[in-house]
Image (cartoon, helix red, strand yellow):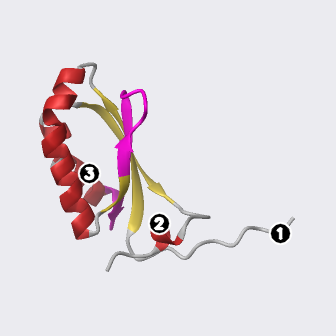
Amino acid sequence: MREAARVAQPDDMKIVNYAKYVDSAEKVASLRPAHRQYMSQLLAEGRLVAGGPFADGSRALFIYEADSVGDAEKIVAADPYQVGGAFASCALSPWEIVKATPALTTAPA
């Protein structure tokens, strides 16, 4: 069997944040406007690839563009959801893209 061709990675890494919310829909909802403004800022700066909650509202997935996991930790630390206590936990992990649409593999301008 032939090995799949690997997608060339940009200099920055993709870091996945698998976040779990606290068990308080009210707390999450109260911080949502500030969180979404922060996400818009990250997107404009080229530091957010994608993000959003799962359909059941208990967790969310964010994909950051960062030089290291440490840099992604700084992104999370400044997130209003983290500052305001809406994240129960966050698991950060480097993500190696093997196959994807070009939008996920193109380095931000």
Image quadrant where one finds the C terminus: bottom left
Instruction: Find numbered disc 3 in the image and state the secondary structure of the residue it sits on.
Output: helix
Query: Between tags 3 and 2, which lies in front?
Result: 2
Q: Please tell me whether mark 1 sits on a helix, a strand or a loop.
A: loop
Q: Dots 3 and 2: beta carbons under 8 Å?
A: no
Rendered location of residue 32, percent (x, y): 19, 38
**Label 1 crowd bin: few (<14), some (14–19), many (20+), radius 10 Å:** few
Q: CA distance from mark 1 to mark 2?
A: 24 Å
Q: Residue furthest bottom?
A: 109
Left or right for 99, reference 66: right
Q: Quadrant of the N terminus?
A: bottom right
| Residue 108, image quadrant | bottom left
Q: Which residue in the protein does label 1 denote?
A: 2
* Residue hosting label 3: 73
Residue labelled with disc 2: 104
> Can you tell which quarter of the image residue 29 is in?
top left
Which badge, 1 or 2, comes first in the chain's sequence? 1
Percent position of residue 78, x then y: 15, 49
Give the extent of the magenta segment: 51-69
Mark 1: amino acid: Arg
The disc labelled 2 sits on which kind of residue? Leu
SS for callout 2 = helix
